[in-house]
Every structure is written in C-alpha cells, then in structure tokens.
Image (cartoon, grey):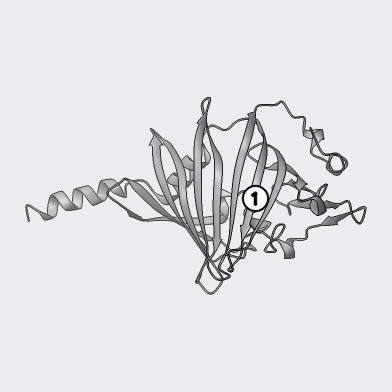
Amino acid sequence: MRLIIPIFFILNCIFSMTGLELAKLMDSRDKPLDIKSINTMTLTNKKDKKRVLELISMSKDDSKKQMIWFLKPRKDKGIAFLKLEKENEDDFMTMWLPGFSRFKRIKSSQKSDSFMGSDLSFEDLTNRTINDYNYNIIDTDENDFYYLESIPKGIDTEYSKHITKIKEIEKNIFIAIEENSYDKDNQLLKNKIFNFKKINSYYIMDKLEVSNVQKNHSTLLTLDKIELNNQFEDSKFSQKSLKIIPK
C-alpha cells in the first residue's frame, strides 16, 4: 500500500491537465503578425530520386491567410497558391497557373490531394480548429513529452486521428515535436517531424519533414530568410497578387 499511493499520486499529477487544455495551450503560443520566408522543398521518392523546389511564402494571422509563389524549377516558376481560412464556411484555396493563364480553385473534395507533388496535402496546409476535435493525453515519458491524440468530430478530413508528441520548452509554452497521422482505416499514413527556432520572442517552425509511409515518399521543407511582422495588409492576400512574384 505504501508504494501504490505515491505511484497513484504521480500518475494523477501527470494527467491532471486535459487533452483539450493542452491543445489550447499549444494554440495560445505567441505568434508574429505575419511571416515572409524563402523556402526549399525537397521531394524524395522510393528510388531515392530527388526533386527540389524553391518558393516564397507570405502568411498572416497564424497562416490563416497565406500566399506561396514557386521560383524553381524553371517549369514551375510563377505557379502560385492562395489560402484564406474562414470560420463557419469552406476555406478558399486557389492556384494561379501561368502556363494556362488561369486560376484553379481547390474544392473541398480535393483537400486530400497532394500539394505540388509533395507529401503535404492541401488539408495539411490549413490550421485545425480546436472545437473540431476530441483530445486525449494518452501517454507521457521520462523526458516530459506529452502524447496528444486528436480525433476529428464529424468533419470532412482524410485522417481518422493524429497523435502528436509535444514538449513544454518554457513555462506554458508547448511545441509539437513529431506527429503521426492515420488514414480512414486507422493505418499510419504520415509521419511529421517539426523543428522550431526562437526568433525574438517567437518560436517559428524552420524545418518540416513529412514521410508518407504508405508510398515510401518524403518531403523536407526548410524555411530560410525568415522575416517577421512585415505589416502586410489584408488586401494583399488576393488572386491579383498571385500573378506578381514578390521580391
């Protein structure tokens, strides 16, 4: 009995925070008003053949507004993407295809499609709405990592659940380190590894590795030349802006 009581007390302390509370703490981390970066996206197939793309990204309001322009390779130069996340209605996503001189709207039914041949789907480019998921802390380990299970509540998604490995790096500042995402058959589909660096008072993701374990294909996204708080106007995030590659 002397051993049971201390063990019970420790476990009770570990799980005293609910999954929803942890999700809200992650979401409440201080973020810049906007971000501009030059990124490299390296795609590797099962034969270890690589394809490298270079792009410019501008985002605002925790990436709820985002534009991406592709610079390289030459055949993809000028292709651009606009995302406007909206409450209580479908997100607006479109791509500018300069070779065809037209826009291509991304429909809700296409959100599971690959973004530019990468292991990121259009859904992966959007934020998760807190209230759209049920959360459970399913484990912790000796290094104080939390394992958070997120199960969608009746929303249209390509995933059955996510299990996210989370670290408290400062008091009440929680960062996702790694995540496994499962398909509709509850089979592991993607593994994601995140790296953050501190810029001023913000923790900014500067590297993302995504592996599609079912296709044996991977994507490495690195963010360079990161600029924060550029004072972007909302009006900048428009279809018209997609036609002009920023400098």
The foreground one among 59 and 160 is 59
- Kind of residue at disc 1: Met
Q: Quadrant of residue 237?
A: top right
The foreground one among 172 and 41 is 41
Q: Label 1, on which residue?
A: 41
Which x, y percent locates residue 22? 43, 45
What residue lies at 68% left-to-right and 38% top-to-bottom? 38
Asked whether, in this view, residue 168 is left or right of residue 62, the answer is left
Q: Quadrant of residue 47?
A: bottom right
Which x, y percent locates residue 221? 60, 48
Which x, y percent locates residue 52? 67, 52
Asked whether, in this view, residue 221 is left or right of residue 196, the answer is right
Q: Residue furthest bottom?
A: 185
Classify 127 as above or below 202.
Answer: below
Classify 141 as above or below 185.
Answer: above
What residue lies at 40% left-to-right and 44% top-to-bottom? 167
